[in-house]
Amino acid sequence: MIDLQGVTKHYPGFTLGPLDLAIEEGFVTGFVGANGAGKTTTIKLLLRMAHPDSGTIQRPDMADIGVVLDTPSYDGDWRVSTVGKVLRPFYPRWSDARFQELLERFNVPADRKVKQLSRGMGMKLQIAAALAQGATFLVLDEPTSGLDPLSRDELAEIIGDFMLDEHRTVLFSSHITSDIERIADYVAVIDKGQIVTCAEGSELLGSYRILHGGRTPLDPDVAAEAYGLRSHAAGWDALIATRLIGEIPDDAVAEEPTLDDIVVRIAKGH
């Protein structure tokens, strides 16, 4: 459904790409990376909020893309019911009945102003609008930021219901990696404007190991490929590719990392 090939975007002090990223139809793809890694820039390019300096982007029509941000981009003085009236002309498949149904299901008061909504309510309003427009591709950019565990659980259920149709697709960007691990089928890791890896969730976790070493140091060639190598009083620790496990010292212990471990260590670099 989504395919970015050789995409670049230059800003003062930051360059995205060249970036290749394929987002498979019918799956939830998690998009993770440290702040400033390039997640938001990539999403802006997908949404035509920015134009690439080079490369190609294959994406659905904008009418098929629903967007959920950490806070609604609507005018804060609009009533919730007004949101539907304003959006209706821009989406040929818009359904007022569906919008009202979803507002009632999510317990979002139609007469309340957007600026009076909690973060959780604001998220649900955006999802209601995306589903009422008939979107088949949801882009969620940090939607769980600042949400309580209950609201995050409700979002997971909503995405699960949305994905019952095998032709629907979700790109879920978040710094809360536990949400990504729970929801995503695939995970793409971006660092310093580059896609480091994109794989099925369990495959990604199986591709790396956290090492805890003692007195024996890592072989220099392995150390050069390790992420976030650090020394401490008891020895050292690092993230390495699983393929290098046969080259670690005998007194080192390897364990499967969390997604958070992978993102943090990759951000720290080799």
Image (spheres, rainbow, N blue to C red):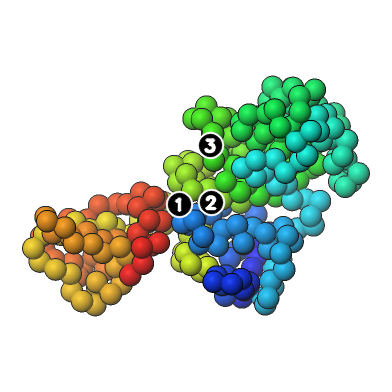
Image quadrant occupied by the N terminus: bottom right
Give the alpha-carbon distance from disc 1 to disc 2, as whole Å. 9 Å
Give whichever of 143, 11 is nearer the camera. Answer: 11
Query: What residue sits right under mark 3 in the picture?
Result: 146
Give whichever of 4, 90 is nearer the camera. Answer: 90
Q: Is 165 placed above or below 34 here?
A: above
In the picture as drawn, the residue positioned furthest to the left comes out as 215
Give the alpha-carbon distance from disc 3 to disc 2, as whole Å. 18 Å
Query: What residue sits right under mark 2 in the picture?
Result: 30
Q: Is 6 placed above or below 64 here?
A: below
Residue type at mark 1? Gly
Instruction: Return the x and y of residue 201 as percentages of the image width and height.
Output: 45, 52
Mark 1 or mark 2, whichever is nearer to me? 2
Marks 1 and 2, the one that precedes in the sequence = 2
* Mark 2 residue crowding within 10 angstroms, few (<14) / some (14–19) / many (20+): many
Residue at coordinates 31% horizontally, 72% vertically from top-left? 225
Mark 3 or mark 1, whichever is nearer to me? 3
Determine whether the residue tagged by mark 1 lies in a helix, strand or loop: helix
Report whether 139 appears left or right of 242.
right
Give the alpha-carbon distance from disc 3 to disc 1, as whole Å. 24 Å
Residue 201 is tagged as 1
Image quadrant occupied by the C terminus: bottom left
Residue at coordinates 25% horizontally, 52% vertically from top-left? 255
Give whichever of 149, 185 is nearer the camera. Answer: 149
Q: Do the residues labelled 1 and 2 touch (CB within 8 Å)?
A: yes
Marks 3 and 1, the one that precedes in the sequence = 3
Instruction: Return the x and y of residue 189 as percentages of the image width and height.
Output: 48, 59
Instruction: Return the x and y of residue 220 as percentages of the image width and height.
Output: 20, 76
Report whether 66 appears left or right of 254.
right
Residue 229 found in image quarter: bottom left
Is residue 119 in view from this perspective?
yes
